[in-house]
Amino acid sequence: MLEKILPAEVACAEVFGDPLGVVLFPEEEAVLARAVDKRRREFTAARHCARRALADLGVPPVPIVPGERGAPQWPAGIAGSITHCAGYRAAAVARTRDVVTIGLDAEPDEPLPDGVLTVISLPAERDRQDALVAARPGTCWDRLLFCAKESVYKAWFPVARRWLGFEEADITIDPVRGTFEARLLVPGPAIGDVPLTGFTGRWLAADGLLLAAITVPSQLKS
Ligand SMILES: CC(C)(COP(=O)(O)OP(=O)(O)OC[C@H]1O[C@@H](n2cnc3c(N)ncnc32)[C@H](O)[C@@H]1OP(=O)(O)O)[C@@H](O)C(=O)NCCC(=O)NCCS
């Protein structure tokens, strides 16, 4: 279902369980040296997805290990993103000539635990949440906001190489078009000559999951 919210130049793969027989590279095994079983399973399934997606771009299997602040290290010329949550693992990749960064996040379509929305949202976002809940009950809009914010961070970090707090992006969800706009409240890096001021993403609710995906084209329009 991920392909529904990604452009054609992005290759993706997803699994709804843990595929058997996935072989990790020694570099990846080293990352898991002290990992608990849950972490081993999600990491391994995500590598399976990443290699399938890379194969669609014609890229042979390579180790994909976490780098600075956990960001996955992709082969030269590739941008990508990984997500995993209970019952779902996915990866999306593209050529950097087309796409400069990708942010992908999946969450269960369940309400956030009490108190979390206040921590991860701005007052204006909470006002919009109230309107969404009143107009369209049935989707966990608080969790979708969280999911969109996580996708923002994953798209932001590879190009900015620094932290972005939950209070540093103001997100507006469009419930009809299945999109969201993230307005950056801090200066962003330049993409080419154009300053990055925000992100446009797409989202999807299906099969008890929420997915959010951001793709930033290499040629940003000013
Ligand atoms: C890093 C973070 C976004 C991961 O999200 P999550 O929902 O906990 O976990 P997911 O399973 O969806 O994603 C995990 C994957 O994210 C990727 N990831 C981790 N750190 C990353 C980073 N700095 N940049 C890009 N991708 C990163 C990794 O590929 C990781 O999988 P892997 O370890 O198997 O390679 C989250 O833990 C976090 O730190 N959030 C706080 C920052 C934030 O969201 N700010 C809001 C800005 S508006």
Image (tube, rainbow, N blue to C red):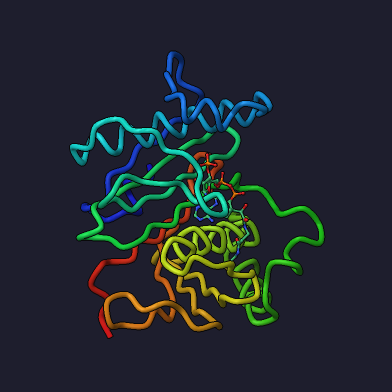
Image spot of residue 98 (x, y percent): 21, 60
Image spot of residue 40 (x, y percent): 59, 27
Q: Residue at image x 52%, y 25%?
A: 29
Image spot of residue 66 (x, y percent): 51, 44
Q: Quadrant of the rendered structure where residue 37 is?
A: top right
Most extreme residue toward the right is 114
Q: The N terminus is located in which quarter?
A: top left
Image spot of residue 122 (x, y percent): 67, 77
Q: Residue at image x 32%, y 75%?
A: 191
Q: How many marks?
A: 0
Q: Residue at image x 35%, y 54%?
A: 5
Describe residue 14's horizontal placement relative to residue 172 as left or right.
left
Vertically, is 190 above or below 98?
Answer: below
Q: The C terminus is located in which quarter?
A: bottom left
Describe residue 119's horizontal placement relative to residue 76 as left or right.
right
Most extreme residue toward the top is 21
- Of residues 91 and 176, the one nearer the viewer is 91
Q: Quadrant of the rendered structure where residue 125 is?
A: bottom right
Vertically, is 74 above or below 22?
Answer: below
Q: Quadrant of the rendered structure where residue 219 is?
A: bottom left
